[in-house]
Amino acid sequence: MEELLSTATLFLLAAAFLGGFVDAIAGGGGLVTVPALMLAGLSPVESLATNKLQALFGATSSTLAYARKGHVDINSQLPAALLAGLGGALGAVLAAVVPGDFLAALLPVLLIAIAVYFALKPNMDDIDRARRMTPFVFGLTLVPLIGFYDGLFGPGTGSFFMIAFVALAGFGVLKATAHTKFLNLASNLGAFLVFAAVGVVYWKIGLAMGAAQIFGARLGAALAMRNGARIIKPLLVIVCILLAARLLLDPEHPIRIFFAA
């Protein structure tokens, strides 16, 4: 039993490190950590809740790394972060009553569309461009909406923040990544507080994985800042495609059930 417990713990720590590394660069760390938690024996709800706890450590680590280098001004982004956190909390509250099949069916299509956008869009670099939406409108609409999705469902939140910042806010890829991590941290926190209040978080597992997340996130953020769009863009495309494939490979996914009927 001790050996099995040790093996499971090492597996979860490795998954958390890898999840933090990937998430700091392109988002999608939950693609690694949520299945790992479920393989370790946690229920889907417990896996999502515990994942929020451990993800807080990685998101905080990468956010601070980007902030130290001046890629995100935390003080100026606090109002948007508060709205993202509120959206995440509301999403978590409604998670039990909003039908998840529609979101599950739509998500792979959206992720593939994001991958195609980033793969084919020319001149995708770290230079800021003309914005299509004012910061006020952006923060008041898209930020809480994506935060709400994070609390309600979760997978792909970082990718949605990324495409919003690049396509609508006019951010360069590296700047978009830095701001994505801060707002994703806020939406994670909002959702986590709700999950913690209803008692579905495995604290010991989440805290242990959180420690591994810190190191993975620091390494990923350093690599992203060193290479910018050259590494962020291809990894974002890969993560979106893998996440979509992971969802579609689930025999219980609504799209598979529909075509099998």
Image (cartoon, grey):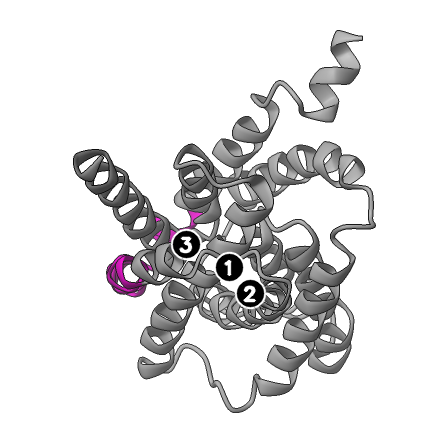
Q: Which mark is residue 188?
A: 2
Left or right, 17 with reference to 85: left
Which element carries disc 3, helix, strand or loop? helix
Which residue matches tag 3? 23
The answer for how far apart the CA atoms under marks 2 and 3 are is: 13 Å
Callouts 1 and 2 close, C-beta under 8 Å: yes
Instruction: Give residue 125's quadrant in the image.
Output: bottom left
Relative height, residue 244 to residue 176 (above, below): above
For this orientation, the residue located farthest to the bottom is 75
Please report the residue visible at 60 percent of the width from the left and 46 percent of the height from the top.
45
Left or right, 122 with reference to 37: right
Q: Is residue 197 visible?
A: yes
Magenta segment range?
A: 211-233
The quarter in which the C terminus is drawn is top right
Depth check, front residue: 209 or 180: 209
**Label 3: how many Cα within 10 Å (few below 14, some 14–19, many 20+):** many
Instruction: Give residue 214's quadrant in the image.
Output: bottom left
Please report the residue visible at 60 percent of the width from the left and 55 percent of the height from the top.
163
The amino acid on which the numbered mark 3 sits, given as a three-letter code, is: Asp
In magenta stretch: residue 73: no
Which residue matches tag 1? 52
Q: Position of residue 50 (x, y in %)?
A: 48, 55
Relative height, residue 85 to residue 151 (above, below): below
Depth check, front residue: 4 or 259: 4
Q: Position of residue 222 (x, y in %)?
A: 25, 64
Depth check, front residue: 169 or 84: 84
Ranked by sequence position, the earlier of labels 3 and 1 is 3
Ranked by sequence position, the earlier of labels 1 and 2 is 1
Please report the residue visible at 24 percent of the width from the left and 60 percent of the height from the top.
219
